[in-house]
Image (cartoon, grey):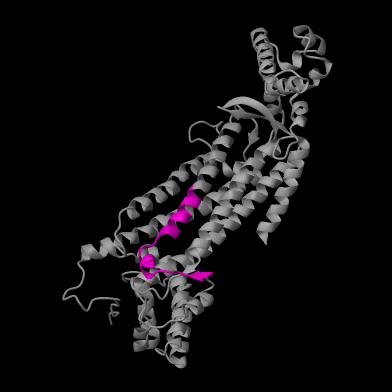
Amino acid sequence: MAEEKVSLWGGRFAEGPSETFRRYSWSLHFDKRLLAADIRGSQAFARALEGVGILTATEREQLVTAFENILKDSREPGFLEGADDEDIHTLVIRKLKEEVGGLADKIHTGRSRNEQVSLDTRLWLRGEIESVQARIGALLEALVELAKRYPNAVIPGYTHMRRAQAVLWPHYLLAYFEMFSRDWERMEQARARTNVMPLGSGALAGSGFPFNREAIAADLGFGSITRNSMDVSADRDFVLDFLYAASVTMIHLSRLAEDWILYSSEEFGWLELSDTVTSGSSLMPQKKNPDSMELLRGKCGRVVGALNSLIVTMKALPLTYNRDMQEDKEMLFDAMDTLQLSLDMTRVVVESAQLKTAPPLAAAEESWVVATDLAEALARSGMPFHNAHKLVGRLVLYSVNNGKKPGDWTAEQLAAFDPAFTAEFARLLHPAEGMKSRNIAGGTGPDAVAAALQQAEQRLAALRK
């Protein structure tokens, strides 16, 4: 016996949708992941319907139990096999009718699919954002642990991809710690804007039933209720907020990937990426390619593209709901999947990476990353900084022209070059010494970095709570 087709609309129509329109507009193949959210929201709505006298206590209990059975069945293989429903909402109603018969027809009393979609998306997104935050926290922890493994390692810092000043390896990693900490905060803000309960808004004008919206919000764990029913029907700002936060996070992941692709290359030789996150060549036996980082860099475009796509979709829609807005789901789901997997991948790379401390130290020692240290020391001795800058610049030019590295200069040679270079300047020719003057909060001085690492661990502990 063929299953009865369920639709949330249709009385106005003499004919059903064409096969082409069905294939073009139906969404079960992607919005099926909202099933648990749809059921949870519908259970809360059943309790609200009891509150306004549409359902008896017995009917409400029947519906809530039936929804629970559907959720349980959905975990079994083949639950969706052969399903030909318009979307996840109609599938759930069909399954509900199989459980409770005609009583299922009451569940949509005073509820529009517009607000139902908003509710389901918010419930789903709220939980997924929490999962993203947990993954960001795990990555932050991996960065701190990698920093603690090499607390005194010296590397060149770069501007314009040219060696600029020496920094400690933990200071470099803590720069990414700050980026991803801000990403966690942006996710928290996106979650707060998502965590607003829309039920009771109807299609656009508000429900005709006196639901206790605050009670529904409390039932579903929302922080507040929406303030305007037209806004609910037209709103995808909360999705845009998440996609923006996700895009910035992916940009930060991509920047780290670019750094580590370079630093693990033969030309740099600083990092050794684990065999578990690299791959070889089908032709060249010697290759060890940073594919995980390259894919990470590439997948950034997918998430940024999702943000741009939804912005363009929403940019000129008249109030209130338009079917264009269905296009938010696939890009949202793909962006979420991409972001979560990218965070997992980066964490694994960070946890398994090894720093080769000698090459970056040699790169710092053979270059003139100590030039600023010398100029600032001259300024501290009383020389105007502009003059100090010029003097050190002349020292660098002479050294470059004569093949001298900073470590090749003796105290006597420095003094002979210019008497302003007194004996104590010789120690500043070593990068690890010069950075000791940078113990200002946020700087790369050893004491400042040790304090920053300790603070990072305290912030991590707060995030875990």
Q: Main secondary structure of the magenta part?
A: helix
Determine the residue positioned at 69% across, 53% down: 459
Residue 228 magenta:
yes
Q: Is residue 87 above or below residue 243?
A: below
Would you say residue 78 is visible in this rendering? yes
Q: Is residue 441 above or below residue 460?
A: above
Residue 142 magenta:
no
Residue at the right extreme? Answer: 423
Would you say residue 88 is visible in this rendering? no
Q: Is residue 351 above or below residue 386?
A: below
Numbered label tally: 0
Toward the viewer: 205 or 332?
Answer: 205
Toward the viewer: 397 or 206?
Answer: 206
Indicate the quadrant containing the C terminus: top left, top right, bottom left or bottom right: bottom right
Which x, y percent locates residue 100?
A: 39, 87
Q: Using the rendered view, name the quadrant where residue 449 is placed.
A: top right
In the image, is 11 to the left or to the right of 361?
A: left
Which x, y percent locates residue 338?
A: 48, 52
Q: What's drawn in magenta, residue-wise?
A: 223-247
Determine the residue positioned at 48% across, 72% down: 75
Determine the residue positioned at 69% across, 46% down: 144
In the image, is 192 to the left or to the right of 333?
A: right
Q: Is residue 354 above or below residue 54?
A: above
Q: Using the rendered view, name the quadrant where residue 321 is placed.
A: bottom left
In the image, is 273 to the left or to the right of 18?
A: right
Which x, y percent locates residue 114?
A: 35, 69
Indicate the quadrant containing the N terminus: top left, top right, bottom left or bottom right: bottom left
Which x, y percent locates residue 349?
A: 61, 44
Toward the viewer: 6 or 404?
Answer: 404
